Amino acid sequence: MTTVQPFATTAAAASVHLSSQTPRGEISEPEEGEEREREREREREREKGERERIYGHRPSMATQTAASCTGSTLLQPISEIINLPVDQVNFVACQLFALLMAVWFRLYLHPSKTSPFIRHVVATLLGFYLALFCFGWYSLHFLVQSGLSYSVMIFVGLEHMHKYCFIVTLGYLILCQITRVYVFDYGMYSADFTGPMMVITQKITSLAFEIHDGLAKRDGQLTPSQKYLAIRRMPSLLEYLSYNCNFMGILAGPTCSYNDYMAFIEGTGYQPRHQENANGKENGKYKQSEPSPKNDVISKLCTCAISLAIYLSLCHLLPVEHSINDGFVSSTPFHLQVVYLYLAMLALRPKYYFVWTLADAINNAAGFGFNGYNKDGSPRWDLISNLRILDIEFATSFKMFLDNWNIQTALWLKRVCYERCHINPMAATFLLSAMWHGVYPGYYLTFLTGIAMTMAARAVRHNIRPYFQVSDSHKRIYDVVTWAGTQVAISYTVAPFVLLAVGRSLKFYRSWYFCLHLLCLLVVVALPVKSRRQQPKEQQDGLKDNQADHNSTDNNCNQKDKAT
């Protein structure tokens, strides 16, 4: 769950004043954590009072972030008018500028008009410019992280290069996250420089594993998708920097495979798909009109506008932090607390819809993201899409929600961890996801809870679902019940991810009496299910077939073979 997070309210803004106090000397450990949180809140209030004394009035959100913003302050007047932090205004402005540059890049630097070298240079320089505008000197971390990892690739042997590269890249990201959170500003939850580093980390580690697969392994040791992704030669420094820091994905991603990116730069991304037209008949020639991304870009920009409007309208009306307010918890029936939590999370998701859909539109506008044709002959531009909104909002299982949320990150976790880890791959994947997201304690509580939720959801699906497949009416009942259960489970699991601090997260779970944790434990004990790695091969093949429609990126791995 991703990356640069615009329009996020500062965690300190949602202060919680506890009404009950425990006498000194009789404070339990959870209450000590809450006491530290209250002390931080009092410190922030003192800082706000000092700023009011200096400015003569209560400063706006834009003024509060102006001094801490390391990027350009050119858009400070706009920030003050709309009362949003200047770093978030910079982010949106840069993304809109990147959208315009993407159109220019596709039309005037088309592969038929210029060389891959020029396309690499322009994409990289534009990416560095956007990074400097948004993050100032902090953007040097992008170069340092990329340079260290490239040195490992060059000087370490192929046999262990991917392991050392993974450790160095992820370690540098975690070091920067620790510095940002615990040295500079614990509660700042805004457009920070570690967001782009998260995407760069995905790209570097994926690249290292793909180089290892292509140069140090035999084809017989690789899965079909690993064969497609394998890299058969070491990228040059320019190609490497262009892949990591191009203007289309430097700020918000999404990540993509190196081979797909090189096919886009060299203009070969359409070749396998041009061998057949929409009706499956041979065209007999390669030179045909390229599919235009215009309709898809316009559609995604409309989605962005709607998502942004919904988020700005509801984010202040339904703050997640209100769910742990003492007055709210004590005076609100439990079922209404459940409804409020669901609505608060529903109001929060459009922020991510806006960021990821805009990033997808930028790549499509540049000509990147073509993924073949639909059955009706219309082009598909979802090769690197990061979410499917309807599948998220109407998900009927925990897995279905995760499969359609932050898709490219899920694929990265699958390719570098789940498929390669031989000891408890699910727990290892959730742990890696938590480490990659950051160092807030709430992240780890979320992903630890996610392990229990995943195991319980798998047990329910394997043991209970078959009884509801006897008729359409039973299926509809099952879908309605599992939809409601999935939405509540997701909201319950993700609450610490939003609350961040361990004290507030545990307070939230205590207000729910840890009910879903206990329920998951009961379900896993009462309804055991075999590990998917231990199931019969035929059953696993059937599961893979059912998942095929929900994984367009992996389907593309075999596209070249299927085209003929």
Image: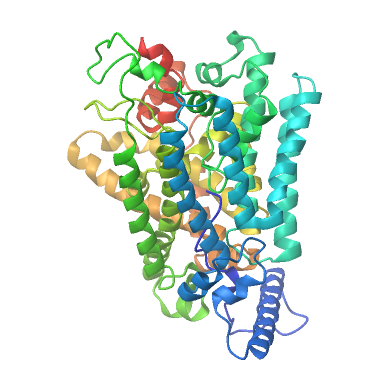
Task: Using the rendered view, name the quadrant where residue 25 is placed.
Answer: bottom right
Image position, residue 437 (x, y; %): 61, 49
Which image quadrant: the C terminus? top left
For the residue pair 90 and 308, the one nearer the viewer reads as 90
Q: Nearer the viewer, residue 559 or 234?
A: 234
- Residue at (34, 16) in percent of width and height: 287
Q: Residue 104: where, in percent of width, then height?
A: 44, 40
Left-right relation of 57 to 560: right
Q: Is residue 83 at least partly visible in the picture?
A: yes
Vertical comparison of 377 with 179: above or below: above
- What residue is rendered at 66% in x and 30% in y? 238
Position of 173 compared to 367: left or right?
right
Measured as percent of width and height from the top left, residue 206 is found at 61, 30
**Whether residue 457 is situated above or below residue 549 in the rendered picture:** below
Counting the numbered discs, the total is: 0
Name the residue rendered at 69%, 29% in the picture. 237
Q: Nearer the viewer, residue 278 or 421?
A: 278
The answer to which image quadrant residue 442 occupies is bottom right
The colouring scheme, among rainbow, by chain, secondary structure or one colour, is rainbow
Is residue 385 in view? Answer: no
Q: Position of residue 144 (x, y in %)?
A: 75, 43
